[in-house]
Image (tube, helix red, strand yellow):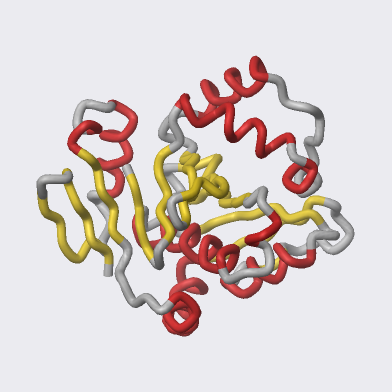
Amino acid sequence: MKYTRYGISISLMKEEDIEMVRQWRNDPVVANNYEFREHITPEMQEAWFQSVNNIHNLYTIIEYQGENIGVINIKNIDWETLECEGGIFLPDPKYHQTFVPAVVSYITTEIIFVMLDWKISHAHVLKENKSVQAFVKMLGYELMPGQEEVNNQHYQITRESFEKRAPRIKKAIGVLTGSEEKGMLLVTRDEFEDPMVLQWEEKVKTSRFIEKAETTEAGRLYCFS
């Protein structure tokens, strides 16, 4: 299951990815952005993956220019209120001063409000992490009341707020990336029997923003407006 836009792809995290993710998560560049900074062992990572590999958490691997470069996580999903919490990390500093973090941040929010058609997204950002704060504010996240002096600050964005900003942001990203392509989700033929992929596909198929759906040689393809 792979979502592609602006030359960036994200794929559902599989068990074979978790050692790579563990190495990234233990890197101080990443760990310093989290409250939990203890060293993560392979056993801890396996237990974590088993706890989140379900329909209430969407963990994906980011791919750019043929290289795996980080993680998008959408977690704590409430299917009744259509709320979740989103986040990303990119371990390689060479991407930090490029357009990639901004584009990935936008894609994360687009997955939440367009591909999955949810209502509210939350994010937690450390008080000292000014660069991430700038990204989430650009997307329309607002600091929640009473969070000014909290270390791990709580931000929130509604679908209405995102939709107001999305046209301007998409235009800017199109200029940055030189791409106007629409978001495309592909479920490959070898995933047709994967229970986890099929659960997510059923959720995606309810989105009001699907412009076109077709079966190709590669698999089932969904295009979003």
In this view, 174 is above or below 189: below
Q: Answer whether residue 166 is visible to the viewer in this image.
A: no
Q: Which of 125/105 is in front? A: 105
223 to the left or right of 139 = left
Image location (x, y in percent) of residue 124: 70, 52
Q: Residue 53: image x %, image y %?
A: 47, 28
Between residue 110 and residue 220, name the one nearer to us.
220
Residue 59 in view (yes/no): yes
* Residue positioned 10% across, 49% down in the render: 216
**Residue reaching furthest top?**
43
Residue in the picture at 85% in, 60% down:
128
Q: Is residue 177 left or right of residue 34?
A: left
Residue at horizontal 24%, vertical 43%? 187
Residue at 66% across, 33% down = 23
Up-down relation of residue 74 to residue 114 (above or below): above
Q: In the picture, which quadrant includes the N terminus? A: top left
Quarter that holds the C terminus: bottom left
96 horizontally vs 53: left or right:
right
Q: Is residue 133 above or below residue 80?
A: below
- Where does the image place residue 11, in percent across and percent down from the top left? 40, 44
Q: Position of residue 185 (x, y in %)?
A: 29, 53
Q: Quadrant of residue 14?
A: top left
Indicate whether 206 appears above or below 201: below
State how many labels appear.
0
